[in-house]
């Protein structure tokens, strides 16, 4: 068994502006840097940290765990949905349900993004069996974990409020 804790990347400057960052790097705001430090204090009980390779997730992990001996591993599969031409657009202009299976222009669909994130899970048992791992990611990452480990449908996840909280816990 692997115990997985999921946390979203910390608050960004783009979130302050209402921007859907997608595959753009993004950067933490002052509020986000403080929240990332709190994340590190809250999750000192993990053996390894996996993070999306997008800058906002990497920065979250570095602030939270950079001064500790906890390994931080970056994985591109844990990225947010690629909004293609819409990366950086106002969040309210992105119709998520419309792109459940239809890719954003020059990007990917939500189902493709969630499937990409879920492929990460297949590699965990090879090295991290019996451990508690932290995954720092995005909406697509959480939906992938919920779909794969709690059998929720992507449609139901998409229709529900994201309802941020201090982490979600799973078992693989």
Image (cartoon, rainbow, N blue to C red):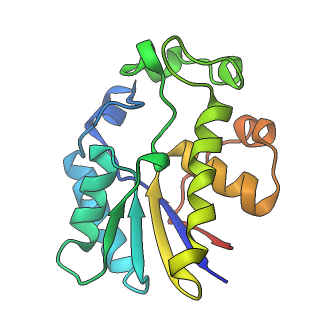
**Position of the C terminus by quadrant:** bottom right
Q: Which of the two residues, 10 or 140, is positioned nearer the viewer here?
A: 140
Is 83 above or below relative to 58?
above
Please give left or right for residue 148 compared with residue 130 in the image. Answer: right
Is 102 above or below relative to 52?
above
Is 33 above or below relative to 47?
above
Q: Position of residue 132 (x, y in %)?
A: 52, 82
In the image, what residue occupies the spot 57% across and 43% down?
140
In the image, what residue occupies the spot 58% across and 43% down?
116
Q: On the image, which quarter does residue 54 sit in?
A: top left
Please give left or right for residue 8 compared with residue 67 in the image. Answer: right
In the image, what residue occupies the spot 37% across and 83% down?
44
Is 71 above or below relative to 99?
below
Q: Position of residue 127 (x, y in %)?
A: 51, 79
Q: Position of residue 59 (x, y in %)?
A: 24, 54
Count of numbered circles on the image: 0
Q: Which of the two residues, 117 or 12, is positioned nearer the viewer here?
A: 117
Give the farthest residue toward the front.
126
**Position of the N terminus by quadrant:** bottom right
Q: Position of residue 4 (x, y in %)?
A: 57, 73
In the image, what residue occupies the spot 56% across and 57% down?
120
Please give left or right for residue 7 compared with residue 59 in the image. Answer: right
């Amino acid at each position: 068994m692997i115990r997985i804790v999921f946390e979203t990347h910390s608050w960004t400057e783009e979130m302050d502006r209402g921007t859907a960052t997608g595959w753009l790097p993004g950067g933490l705001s002052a509020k986000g840097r403080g929240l990332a430090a709190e994340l590190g204090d809250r999750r000192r009980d993990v053996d390894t940290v996996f993070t999306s390779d997008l800058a906002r997730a990497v920065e979250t992990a570095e602030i939270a765990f950079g001064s500790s001996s906890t390994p931080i591993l970056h994985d591109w599969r844990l990225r947010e949905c690629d909004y293609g031409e819409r990366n950086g657009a106002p969040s309210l202009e992105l119709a998520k349900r419309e792109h459940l299976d239809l890719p954003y222009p020059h990007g990917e669909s939500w189902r493709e993004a969630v499937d990409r994130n879920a492929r990460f899970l297949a590699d965990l048992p090879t090295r991290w069996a019996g451990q508690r791992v932290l995954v720092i990611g995005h909406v697509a990452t959480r939906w992938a974990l919920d779909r794969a480990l709690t059998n929720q449908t992507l449609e139901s996840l998409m229709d529900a409020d994201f309802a941020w909280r201090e982490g979600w816990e799973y078992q693989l």
